[in-house]
Amino acid sequence: MTRVLELLVSLLIVAALVVGVGALLPDHGHVERTVEVSSPVRQIFDAANTLRRFPEWSPERRLDPQLNMTYDGKRNGPGAVVNWNGNETVGKGKLEIVSSDEDSQVKMAVENDFTGTNKFYTITLNPSENGKTTKIVWAYDVDYGWDLKSRYAGLYIHGKPDANVQTAVSNFANMLASFPNVDYKDQDIQPVEVTGVPLLFVSTKSPRTLDEVADVTLTAVTQIEEVMKKTGLTQAGPVRTITTNWGDENYVFDVAIPVSAAEFTLDGNTYTITTPVVSETVEELSDAEPAAELKTGDHDEDGNLIVDGKVKARLSYSGLALVTEYAGSPAALPLLRLQEKAFAETHGYLYSEMNGGRFWDEISATSEEGENTYKVYLPVEP
């Protein structure tokens, strides 16, 4: 009986120690990691203020490359949500942006199997005095309350939670380094829905000088206008310059004019302008078997309709695009295209500069002083 009492007393002492020590342990956990980057502050903020870039910086994706993710709510800012469901190591979880202060801070609520409640990531941006670099402080906070088990588990916050924060901030910095390093904060860029229209166009190229590009463009416009007269089509929108390749020395592009109808008659035959359909397989012909010369009504390897001479036709891109407007010299257009690329990257829009995904710009207005206003478009996917 005495030994039983001694055992009970010992257990009570141990329990008292457990409770006493637990009561002295912190009821809140906090870890943070920092990294310094040279990206523009607006780029950093925008990339953090959307969860569409979560696959690139996610610690969970590193542990489970097949991680299943779904997006809910808004695309950017408070209300943006990503849910994930992974393997046994990752489990289920959710991130939701709950607050954001432009160019300063983004706060995300975290739901996962880590111990504790009220879990948050807080991403704070601290630009240097010279403005050339920005320190990103990525913090993780969690409450344990009076749950003694959670308080003891909190002793291991520098284990997996800390590793997740370190992985996230490192991946985030690497992701930023892959974006075009241009600042677009003073350029208004917006997503818009555009509708495809029938185009007549000429593919051409020119040395990268304003005068030579203008001369080549004028020649192409003249060729298209001659075909418009033959077909009875009329111009239905501003001339478009569709970029194929902005090279080191040469600029390869299409000059296109929207026209009044998708159906036209030429030399007694009627043709319909359609969306290009590119064949999945392209036969390679030997030098001994040269490709036959394409004639009116044929389609080239990109699915464009051959109209007359160098003039071809197709329905233009239809769908979501980024657009920005600029008044001034066309010499600034390459920078605007780069800014749109950076904007697409930071906001998680997918884009491809091939075929239907190519940039195009057009003159939307001309002032009395002769200064042109340009609109630049980049097709993107949601």
Image (tube, helix red, strand yellow):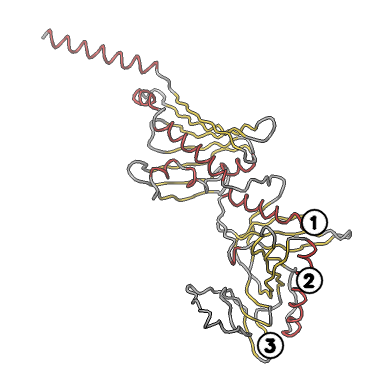
Q: Which residue is mark 3?
A: 266
| Distance (Cα) linking label 3 and label 1 | 38 Å
Residue 263: which numbered mark, if any? none
The quadrant holding residue 299 is bottom right
Tell us which disc is closer to us: 3 or 1. Answer: 1
Residue 218: which numbered mark, if any? 2
Decide: is 200 above or below 339: below
The three-letter code of the residue at mark 3 reads Leu
| Distance (Cα) linking label 2 and label 3 | 24 Å
Decide: is 355 above or below 65: below
Residue 329: which numbered mark, if any? 1
| Residue 204 percent location from the top left of the image | 69, 70
Q: Secondary structure at mark 3?
A: strand
| Residue 321 percent location from the top left of the image | 62, 59
| Residue 23 percent location from the top left of the image | 38, 17
Q: Secondary structure at mark 2?
A: helix
